[in-house]
Image: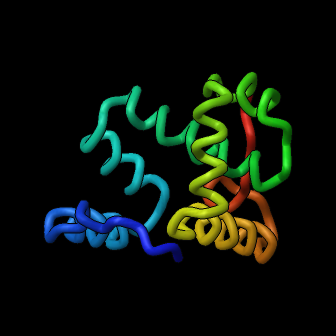
Amino acid sequence: MNNLNLNWKTKDTDNLFKAVLALRNVEECERFFRDLMTEQEIETFAARFKTALMLDQNLPYRQISKVTGMSTTTVTRINYWLERGMGGYSLAIKRLKSAAKNSHHHTRTNSLEFTS
């Protein structure tokens, strides 16, 4: 983890993260995030994470931009955080891959899928 500015960390952000960790499944997360954010905000966060997943697969920036609708500048910024951020993208991707690998069958809750 890089030595990044952590001034954004407060009791309020800790409470938000604890609330997310208290959720038990995808459906509960969907309900929570839909109450918390607009549909557009959820779609934006999902597109950012999809971009990180595609970068992890070493796909070209232009292809990622075309599939996700993100500008190549945003793809570059996400790649920066993927490679030199706090390790959150990498940790989440690693755990999702591990969960998918350890799963005996693919369901919505344990498979990684890309839609275009």
Residue 78 or residue 91, whichever sits in front: 78
Residue 11: x and y in percent read 14, 70
Image quadrant containing the C terminus: top right
Residue 71: x and y in percent read 62, 25
Residue at (32% x, 72% y) in the render: 22
- How many labels were placed on the picture? 0
Q: Is residue 79 above or below residue 73?
A: below
Residue 76: x and y in percent read 65, 40
Residue at (38% x, 56% y) in the render: 28
Left or right: where does residue 96 sit relative to residue 22?
Answer: right
Left or right: where does residue 38 sit relative to residue 61?
Answer: left
Residue 61 or residue 69, whichever sits in front: 61
Residue 24: x and y in percent read 41, 69
Q: Residue furthest left?
A: 11
Residue at (62% x, 52% y) in the render: 80
> Which of the 4 image quadrants contains residue 92?
bottom right
Q: Is residue 4 above or below residue 80?
A: below
Task: State the scheme by which the image is colored.
Answer: rainbow
Q: Is residue 66 above or below residue 43?
A: above
Residue 6 or residue 49, whichever sits in front: 6
Residue at (85% x, 42% y) in the render: 59
Left or right: where does residue 1 sit relative to residue 101?
Answer: left
